[in-house]
Image (cartoon, rainbow, N blue to C red):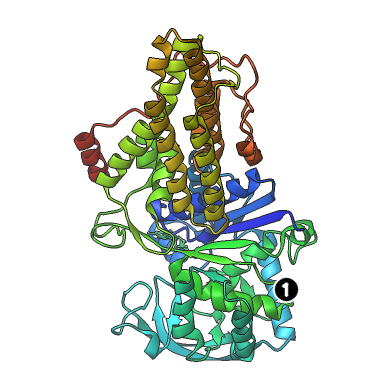
Amino acid sequence: MKNTFYITTPIYYPSGKFHIGTAYCEVLTDAIKRYKKSRGYDTFMLTGLDEHGQKVEKVAEKKGLKPQEHVDEMADSAKKLWKLMNIDYDKFIRTTDEYHCKAVQKIVEKFLENGDIYKGKYEGWYCMPCENYFTETQLVDGKCPDCGREVIKMSEDAYFFNMKKYEQWLKDFYAENPDFIVPQSRKNEIFKNFIEPGLEDLCISRNTFDWGIPMPNDPEHVLYVWLDALTNYITALGYGSDDDTLFNKYWPADLHVVGKEIIRFHGIYWPIFLHALGLELPKQIYAHSWVVMKDGKMSKSVGNVIYPEVLIERYGVDATKYYLLRMMSFAQDSMFTPEDFVERFNSDLANDLGNLLNRTIGMMNKYFDGIIPTNSTAKTEFDDSLEQFVKQQITKIEECMDTYHVSNSLVELWAIISRANKYIDETAPWVLAKSEDESDKEKLKSVMFHLAETMRKIAILLTPFMPKTAEEILKQLNIPFSDKKWDLVYCDDFIAEGTKVIEKGQPLFVRLDKDEEIEYIKSSMK
Ligand code: MSP
């Protein structure tokens, strides 16, 4: 069985500072990667920048920089942000990297040899910000169907990729692989809008600007940004270069994580390009939805943009990650509100999780001088019921993560945290501690043992989403940390005899002043 897991993010346009929408995409991919890694897969996560195209050229010009200088700056700041966000990527590709440019030219040569590309004239409605042509029928109220902005009629000599040639193949492929795109609703959309009406050939070159990879046979033309961009998923692994070791090991990709508006490119053109190259197709594409604001999409002109640094610097990286992963539903756009952020921070993190650890450490010190008791024979029905509940939740979490329902997996994980808090109330260790009865003393040992084990399991389960918090919990419990060992959640008696927890527990998350913080977040929107 293939034990590798290759996962990719989209490569982002370096046209401006990344907001929490972009950050969500990265954090989501990171969480899935970390989950697979902890389950023992040999993982590889790719991210990077999509640096060519007219839009990038224009942004650089505005800043008085050469395009290369601009993208160099942007690549540095993207890497800095992903470091701050503790993203565990394995490779950062830039489409201006020489190896990528050369590989893309080889790919185009292959298409030319196969007769997949022809020269023609392109006329259509062009959306400058999206760098995308649309046919008359694709426009919505005469505007760009993707971003709603003005389009202009353009005509130019251009090279085309013969998509029509592969239309039937694509339909057959989807008939055999109905789950290639998840959620289904996204697949249905591209079927209805682009596949069923019949594929249009794709214009793959431009001669109206220079910032791109030249067509190998006709350097007057530079490659359309999407052919350049999509192929990053294979060139990053060395396809088309001298060393294709990674490619042989990791391709086909297990999962491309992309935003819903770029599913057309990934669900139509990308499979066709790969098929035309005689390569295997990725296993699955997950088209996630958008982080939206009360007043719609985040936009600088509306002044409702939230940057991840604002949240991270004040509330910490794990709280920011938790919120993004928890608030975003699997298939629907989800709304970021400062009120909801503060509410979740206080209730889920400070109260539920933070208090559970605090109570566990506090009672361990109070009743057993900090030493976690070994499994007692005086197991009660509460202990059994807690153990059973945790088992059942672990299965649910795994099911959710295996189908990329990340938010739901956090819901299932928080059910364990609530259950453990309830367990403390049910067993009332403070009553058992006061009792003179020997059997109550044994029961108390059992309760504290079960609490420590549950807390340990929670830490492991948290690892893909909040790795630093997971580490901190285990540090306070004085249990060795390893992010690769998901399997340790199946063990009910793991903690070494004589393990002594920290003397004075540190709060994981300090409760926020609601009004003050809501105001703070609101005032930091730009
Ligand atoms: N460069 C292309 C992708 C090429 S992949 C071969 C691109 N770049 S982008 O910078 O415009 O967008 C990158 C990703 O960020 C997209 O998947 C997009 O959906 C995501 N997001 C941008 N704004 C977003 C939100 N508000 N919410 C969630 N994701 C969002 O498209």
Residue 248, by quadrant, is bottom right
- Residue 74 visible in the current orientation: no
Q: Which residue is pictured at 59% across the width and 73% down the height?
A: 227
- Residue with the mark numbered 1: 279
Above or below, 202 against 434 in this view is below
Q: Nearer the viewer, residue 455 or 523?
A: 455
Residue kind at label 1, given as amino acid type: Leu
On the picture, is 400 further left or further right than 124? Answer: right
Residue found 39% across the figure and 28% down from its top: 426
In which of the image's four quarters is ligand 1 placed? Answer: bottom left
Give left or right: position of 279 versus 273: right
At 65% across and 68% down in the image, what residue appears? 282
Q: Between residues 372 and 117, which one lies in front from this camera angle? A: 372
**Exactly how many numbered labels are in the figure?**
1
Image coordinates for residue 265, horizontal then vertical, percent: 53, 74
Q: Position of residue 179 (x, y in %)?
A: 57, 72
Label 1 sits on a secondary structure element that is loop
* Closest to the observer, 224 or 256: 256
Considering only vertical position in the picture, is 410 above or below 48? above
Left or right placement of residue 21 versus residue 226 in this view: left
Q: Which residue is drawn at 55% across and 84% down?
A: 202
Quick one: label 1, few (<14), some, or many (20+) residues within 10 Å? some
The image shows residue 100 at horizontal and vertical percentages of 66, 63
Residue 325 location in percent, x, y? 43, 49
On whether ligand 1 comes within 8 Å of the CB at mark 1, the answer is no
Q: Can residue 376 be seen in this view?
A: yes
Locate the N terminus and report the quarter of the image it occupies. Answer: bottom right
